[in-house]
Amino acid sequence: MVHLVGAGPGDPELITLRGRDLLAGCDAVVLDALASPLLLSHLRPGAEVHEMGKRAGEPSATQAEIGALLVRLAREGKRVVRLKGGDPFVFGRGGEECELLEAEGIPYEVVPGVTSAVAAPGAAGIPVTHRDWAGHVTVVTGHERGDADGSHVDLAALARLLPDGTLVFLMGARTLPRITAGLIAAGADPDIPAAAVQWGTDPRQRSCSGTLGTIVDAVNAAAMGAPMVTVVGRVAALGERLRSIGRRPLAGRRILVTRARAQASGFVERLRRLGAEAVELPVIAVEPVGERRALEDAARRLAAEAASPPPGGRHAVFTSANAVRLVWEAVRAVGLDARAFAGVRLVAIGPETAAALLDCGLAADLVPGEYVAEAVAEAMIAGGVSGARVWLPRAAAARDVLPVRLREAGADVEVLPIYRTVLPEGTADRLRAELEHGVDAVTFTSSSTVAHFGEALGGAPFPPGAIAACIGPVTARSAREAGYPVAVVAAEYTTAGLAAALSTHFTLGTAAPLP
């Protein structure tokens, strides 16, 4: 079975529910160049990905090769998704592929998608129809099969549709000079409004406006190109008037996320929902330290101590989700479960660490109001720790402020250095490649990310024009010591707080002194 699925205009959230479900259940996907690669996150592990995108003027697979691949995959018994940008039947060659599948006797289904012909102008504040200005809309391809000189598009006929209608040209970035000149030569008013939208609905969206006679110059001045939608008609003037439509706080911002990949997904998703182009470039990876047996033995001791607890009680303090994950793996490896923590007061440094505990069936008894080691120590000491036994699994290079303060208050603290952070292989090369495209902000969620980002820079300066955005004051202090331009520090020391602080910075400017 082959499903021709419209991926929508660019924003991965604009795929249909049916399209998303088919991606989740398919064996192979044949990907179009304009379908967002973020949609591949819906695939199950092991699903095949065949990139067969076509770009004008660049080497790419032929339509015959794409058709042959669809036929072969289907005949191998696979459930195939042909993922196409926009709608398969709006200049997506969906009709040609259906004809081939019909001729080959292969079952197929067409799942419509949101076409960029409507969505891209809409995202730029341009309604393609309007009760006062445009009673009809005509969607035109900017190039056709065998169309070298425009002979397949009757520009004279299109000119007669103005000014009471709207013309929308798809895939016409390279042919825009010929299109506009042809319309004017055919009698269209050169002063009628026109607009162009590049990467519509995507965080990279840009637009410019002018008239039929000036839009080519405006596009060139803005250095815009494919993928681009051009609108000609009186409704194009509304783009300037409705420029705030759907404007999200981080729209157009490119933000580098340095957090470890296993912890970054929620933060990245939040940034993308706020309109940013979030670039994942983890500068830390977590490596266990010491023998796994030592942590497993500690887990056994923790469970055994339930029979004879110390007079001050027992505490387990988690200062990161990484520590939670490694401890839980050790607990399960020795045949224990959440009951190993019976009678243990669980402390989490912040809500994200508390959420990691809850994923293991463990509810934190204490989460301090401020998510730093000093606040953890104060909150625990206020509740009484004299004579208590405290179990502290943490990073090998963590600050000593917490165990020192607790021991001074009379606690017996067992520090378990269970992991360290390292720079993933190849990060420096990836960083250089990403910085060539420029970034508006680099986010740091720990002092470790600051240190490893500096290592990846290899002596190069901080990205020009970018700001450093930090999850809290401890991380901000590390960033300042590294010489980074700290402009954003989250008031709430979580990734949600950091995303909110970035939104405030880029929309309103920093309203309060930085911590």
Image (tube, helix red, strand yellow):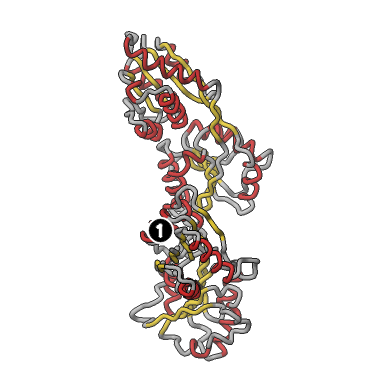
User: Is residue 225 at least partly visible in the picture?
Assistant: no
Mark 1 lies on a secondary structure that is helix
Compared with residue 322, is residue 154 higher up or lower down, i.e. above or below? below
The image quadrant of residue 179 is: bottom right
| Amino acid type indicated by mark 1 | Leu
Residue 114: percent from the left, percent from the top?
A: 41, 67
Compared with residue 502, is residue 112 higher up or lower down, i.e. above or below? below
Residue 233: percent from the left, percent from the top?
A: 45, 80
Q: Is residue 483 left or right of residue 264?
A: right
Compared with residue 77, is residue 285 higher up or lower down, i.e. above or below? above
Residue at (57, 63) in percent of width and height = 52
Q: Which residue is mark 1?
A: 22
Image quadrant for the N terminus?
Answer: bottom left
8 or 431: nearer the eye?
8
Residue 47: percent from the left, percent from the top?
A: 49, 52
34 or 65: nearer the eye?
65
Q: Is residue 308 left or right of residue 299?
A: left
Residue at (36, 27) in percent of width and height = 368
Residue 279: percent from the left, percent from the top?
A: 53, 49
User: Is residue 4 at least partly visible in the picture?
Assistant: yes
Residue at (57, 39) in percent of width and height = 283
Q: Residue furthest right?
A: 459
